[in-house]
Image: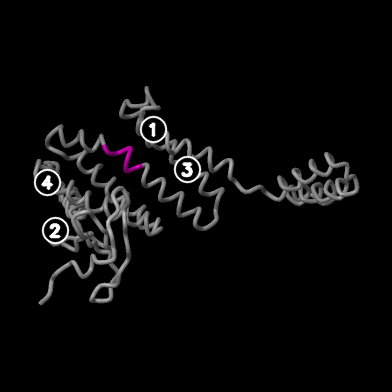
Amino acid sequence: MNTDLGLILHGWSYARGELRVRKIAGGDGRPRIQIRMDMGLMQLEWSGRPDGARPRDSVSLLDYFQSECHRRQRQGQAAPLLLSRADCWELGQEAMQYYWRRLSFFELKEYLRAEEDATHNLDILDLCQEYAEHPEDRQIAHQYRAFVTAHRIQAGVLSLLEEHDHQGALQHLRTGIGNLEEILSRQGDLEHPDSCQELNFLRQWEQELEHSRPLSPEEKLNVELAQAVEQERFELAASLRDRLRLLQAQRHGDLGSL
C-alpha cells in the first residue's frame, strides 16, 4: 500500500502566512477539509468533532462533560463537577481542533458552520470557567473569550452579508459589539478599550458597513432631488418631489393627504 503523501502535496504548494484550504469528498463520500501546512497536510471532518474521534463515547468532550453536569443535577448530587488540569488540557486540545476548522470554514465561506464552531469553543470556555479546579485554567478561559466571541460575531455578520441583508448584518454587528463590551466590562478590561484588538476591529468594521450601506428608496430619491435642484432641472425636481411624497405617504399608510 502506497501511503506517500507526496502524491497529494505535489501541485499544492505551501505559502507562508496564507491558509490554504480545500473541501474534498472522502473515500466514503462524506465531505472533509484539507489544510496545506508547511510540514504537510491536515485533514478534518466536516461535521462532528474535527478529528472524527468519539471521546468517552460522546460526540465531543464538551458534550460528555455537559451531559455529566446535567446528570448530576438530575440526580441531585451535592458535589459539583470538577475539571482537573488533565480535563482542561484535553478540552483545550479539542478547542484547538475546532479553532482550525473554524478558520477553514471562514476561508471556504461556510460562515454558519464557522459560527457553530465558535459557539462550541465558547461553551468550552464557559465550562472551564465554571468548573475548573485550578485558577490557572479559569484564567485561560478568561483570556480567550474576547477573541472567540469576536470570531462568532464576524461569522454571523458575514453570513448575513452573503444573503445581501446589509441592514441585518449591521444590526448584528452592533449587537455583537455591545455584547463584547459587556464581556470586557465584566472582566475589568474596558478601562483601556483601545488595547482590545478584537473590539477595535469590530468598531472599524461597523463604520465601514455604515458607509457602504445601500440607500433606501427614499434616501435615493432625496439624493436625486438634491442633484436635480443643483443642476436646475426643475421639472425633474418637481417629479422627484411628487414621488418622494407618495413614498412617504405609503410608508405612513396615509394616501388621503395626497
Choose between 58 and 20: the one closer to the eye. Answer: 20
CA–CA distance in space, label 1 to label 3: 14 Å
Q: Is residue 41 left or right of residue 24?
A: left
CA–CA distance in space, label 4 to label 2: 12 Å
Tell which circle, 1 or 4, labels the residue nearer the N-terminal end. Answer: 4
Image spot of residue 32 (x, y percent):
28, 66
Q: Residues within 10 Å of mark 4 (few under 14, many from 20)?
A: some
Mark on residue 87?
A: 4
In the picture shown, does residue 183 fall above or below 223? above
Image spot of residue 138 (x, y percent):
19, 35
Tell which circle, 4 or 3, labels the residue nearer the N-terminal end. Answer: 4
| Residue identifier under label 2 | 55
Mark on residue 182?
A: 1
CA–CA distance in space, label 4 to label 3: 34 Å
Mark on residue 64?
A: none
CA–CA distance in space, label 2 to label 1: 34 Å
Instruction: Tell me which segment is drawn in magenta.
Output: 144-149
Could you tell me if residue 47 is visible in this image? no
Q: Is residue 143 left or right of residue 224?
A: left
**Label 4 sits on what residue type?**
Asp
**Label 1 sits on what residue type?**
Glu
Q: Element at badge 3?
A: helix
| Residue identifier under label 3 | 173
